[in-house]
Amino acid sequence: MSSPSLAEDTRRLCQALLRMDTTNPPGNERICAQLLERELREVGLEPVLLEAQPARTNLVVRLRGTGKLPPVLLTAHLDVVEADPTKWKYPPFSGDEHEGCLWGRGAIDMKNMAAMCTAILRRLARSGTRLDRDIIFAAVADEEAGCDLGSRFLVEQHRSLVEAEYAIGESGGFSLHLGDTTFYPIQVAEKGFCWVRARITGEPGHGSMPRHDSVITRLGEALATLGNTQLPLHATSHVSNFLDALRARQPALIQPLIKLLARPQLLARVARLVPGASISRSFSALLANTAAATVVRAGAKTNVIPGVAEFEIDGRTLPGQTDEDLLRELRAVLGSDVEL
């Protein structure tokens, strides 16, 4: 019986992974890890399963090479964020093909990568190929909630299993369509994350006597200000090189617009001219620290004006920028009325 093509194997694995609900929390990545374990053992590899907590499973497997060069690490996370089925065109855990695409939570973040890595290792193991490097594949838990039970656990408790010279992870390799050209970016740097809790305090009171300066009113104003403000631009060398490569392959009429993306006073205006809202947002995020309000808490009873309101911010920092840099930018936007 002939072996399936690399594409067929990848598709089969991806569909199987998409049909497993690993929403984090609670995660339950074990079901995916056990599937990958079976697939890898089928071709003679010896994966190990490691858990920081029950059912929060990480898989690590190594394809031995000649050892002439240090290992390379392939990584993918098996958990996904929540999916509201009512907001999806097709069921988020169906894994079915529609309109030429596989549909499911994790299809691009990042069970696709887990399927590709597994299929590649299966192909290499079957062929008997010995590369100059060991190829390590780590399929990890808990990426969507801070990595404590996944990559951090492996690095701190099982470092020897994943130590490598190079690592290939997510974000690179997807297709970027700009004009008539399709690009396949390579990720060379990573944004950091800084989660911030913002608090507004004031006088509580009874709902029958509204206050124009209530914490609820000020909360709304703070959220609107944050949502409508572009944080300062920081044109890193990585992004400058990326924009130069994009510009070189665009029509002469478009090239000046891409160059202007790195001009703070023109970013918002120029980004609106870039075709596709998602591409426009991506350019903005590449050039600045970002801050998105994601969780809001205030009040407990309908007839009581609360004395405290809080919101949480998902902050992302560019390479070279620190948490304190982001906090300084947030304070400049939100003012002294908001405690960070």
Image (cartoon, rainbow, N blue to C red):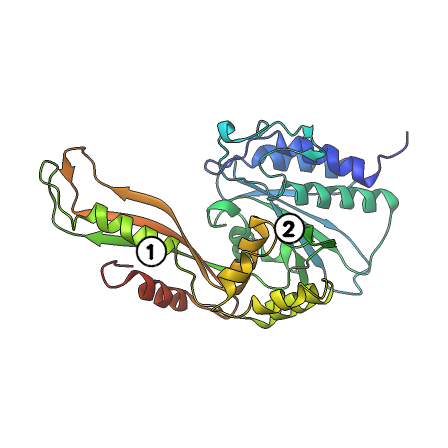
Disc assigned to residue 225: 1
Front label number (2 vs 1): 1
Q: Is residue 157 above or below residue 288?
A: above
- In-front residue for pair 127/294: 294
Q: Quadrant of residue 248?
A: bottom right
Q: Is residue 35 above or below residue 159?
A: above
Q: Is residue 7 above or below residue 171?
A: above
Mark 2 to mark 1 CA distance (whole Å): 38 Å
Q: Quadrant of the C terminus?
A: bottom left
Q: Amino acid at mark 1?
A: Thr
Residue furthest out toward the right: 1
Q: What percent of the width, then of the height, locates residue 293? A: 38, 50
Query: Element under label 1?
Result: helix
- In-front residue for pair 39/280: 280
Asked if the residue under mark 1 is in contact with the one under mark 2, i.e. CB atoms within 8 Å, the reply is no
- In-front residue for pair 173/284: 284
Res 331 seen here: yes
Few, some or many C-alpha atoms within 10 Å of disc 1 (few <14, some 14-19, many ≥20)? few
Q: Which residue is mark 2?
A: 75
Q: What percent of the width, then of the height, locates residue 98? A: 68, 29
Q: Quadrant of residue 11?
A: top right
Residue at (56, 66) in percent of width and height: 261
Q: Amino acid at mark 2?
A: Thr
